[in-house]
């Protein structure tokens, strides 16, 4: 279920087919000798600005600490995403050497059907909802707090990895995403039509300001032939090493070694092994047989 109590994805759940896949992965890993801490949760502590105890993971993502007189978010509507426009500007300068402004690029962006507007995030951030002070706080002092909060669940329960569903829905058709007709389910059993964000943003915005190694692991197809997957997340790189690329590479390499056994165990299980969807079976062979001349 969504952690928002007032957001657009409040109460959204996993498709039953994805829940069955996730449960199968847990069973396979337990049989392979992994200790599964199904009830592990982030610890709680007192936050003076809230005046109460709160789960540190929830506080890190959702509680809206006030900076410069206004609350900030570390999830979807976050000042950290101001950097997206800066990255786009850097790409235009470095690779295209094009004399155009960010506004011109955003105004020129098309829509991917009636349900998805790639320019939407840029336009939202250009409204001035956040300021430079909030941005500097979120990518500066707040990062150290968030690393400590995120890693606390590993320390509290002696965890090595987090196992998460990759999406809320099995791989949908592009037409249903573009047309806002992809069905997503709520925890109360009701169903609504939605699009890309409801399907894929289950964890996509969480802790984007941290260096967290992640891996998507295929878990085979649903009964109707749609690809599924789970995610593995490791510990975040310690704050003191976040600005050292060599340390980051070493951290990622250690993570890849750690997840190897998980991948091997899941892919050795026929019902969880990666498989091409019926719609693309034979496609790669056909592409490979094309005469380049």
Image (cartoon, rainbow, N blue to C red):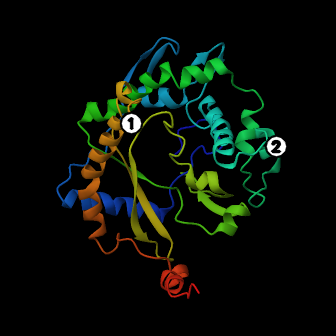
* Residue 100 in which image quadrant: top right
Q: Secondary structure at mark 1?
A: helix
Neighbor class of circle 1 (other Cα within 10 Å; few <14, some 14-19, many 20+) is few
Q: Nearer the viewer, residue 64 or 280?
A: 280
Query: In the image, what residue occupies the spot 52% across and 65% down?
Result: 170
Note whether 289 is above or below 125 in the view shown: below
Q: Nearer the viewer, residue 120 or 4?
A: 120
The quarter holding residue 267 reads bottom left
x and y percent of residue 186 in the render? 57, 53
Residue at the spot of label 2: 104
Residue 279 x %, y %: 55, 80
Is 40 situated above or below 14? above
Q: Position of residue 69 (x, y in %)?
A: 66, 13
SS under mark 2: helix
Residue at image x 79%, y 55%? 110
User: What residue is at 78 percent from the left and 31 percent from the top?
Assistant: 127
Q: Nearer the viewer, residue 209 or 155?
A: 209
> Quick check: 147 left or right of 103?
left
**Rounded to the nearest whole Å, what is the CA distance between mark 1 and mark 2?**
34 Å
Query: Residue 217, position in %: x, y?
Result: 38, 60
Residue at the spot 34% in from the left edge and 37% down from the top edge: 246
- Does residue 124 appear to the left or right of 84 in the view shown? right
Q: Compared to 163, does 222 lie above or below?
A: below
Q: Do the numbered discs 1 and 2 sit on residues whose CB atoms are within 8 Å?
A: no
Q: Which residue is mark 1?
A: 245
Q: Quarter of the image holding residue 73? A: top right
Quadrant location of the C terminus in the rendered image: bottom right
Say whether residue 288 is left or right of residue 104. left
Q: Is residue 69 visible?
A: yes
- Count of numbered labels shown in the rendering: 2
């Amino acid at each position: 279920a969504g952690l928002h109590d007032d957001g657009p994805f409040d109460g959204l759940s996993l498709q039953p087919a994805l829940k069955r896949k996730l449960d199968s992965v847990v069973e396979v890993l337990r049989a392979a000798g992994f200790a599964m801490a199904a009830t592990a949760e982030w610890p709680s502590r007192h936050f003076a600005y809230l005046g109460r105890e709160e789960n540190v993971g929830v506080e890190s993502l959702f509680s809206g600490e006030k900076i410069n007189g206004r609350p900030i978010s570390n999830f979807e509507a976050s000042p950290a995403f101001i950097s997206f426009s800066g990255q786009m500007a850097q790409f235009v300068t470095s690779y295209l050497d094009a004399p155009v402004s960010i506004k011109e690029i955003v105004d020129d962006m098309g829509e991917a059907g009636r349900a998805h507007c790639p320019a939407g995030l840029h336009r939202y951030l250009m409204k001035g909802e956040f300021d430079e002070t909030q941005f500097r706080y979120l990518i500066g002092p707040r990062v150290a707090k968030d690393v400590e909060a995120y890693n606390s669940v590993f320390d509290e329960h002696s965890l090595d990895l987090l196992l998460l569903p990759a999406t809320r829905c099995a791989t949908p058709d592009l037409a249903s995403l573009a047309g806002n007709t992809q069905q997503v389910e709520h925890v109360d059993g009701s169903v609504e039509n939605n699009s890309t964000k409801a399907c894929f943003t289950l964890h996509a915005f969480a802790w984007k300001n941290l260096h967290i190694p992640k891996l998507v692991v295929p878990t085979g197809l649903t009964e109707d032939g749609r690809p599924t997957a789970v995610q593995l997340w490791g510990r975040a790189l310690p704050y003191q090493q976040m600005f050292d690329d060599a340390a980051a590479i070493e951290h990622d390499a250690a993570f890849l070694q750690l997840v190897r056994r998980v991948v091997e165990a899941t892919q050795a299980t026929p019902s969880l092994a990666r498989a091409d969807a019926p719609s693309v079976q034979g496609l790669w062979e056909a592409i490979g047989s094309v005469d380049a001349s």
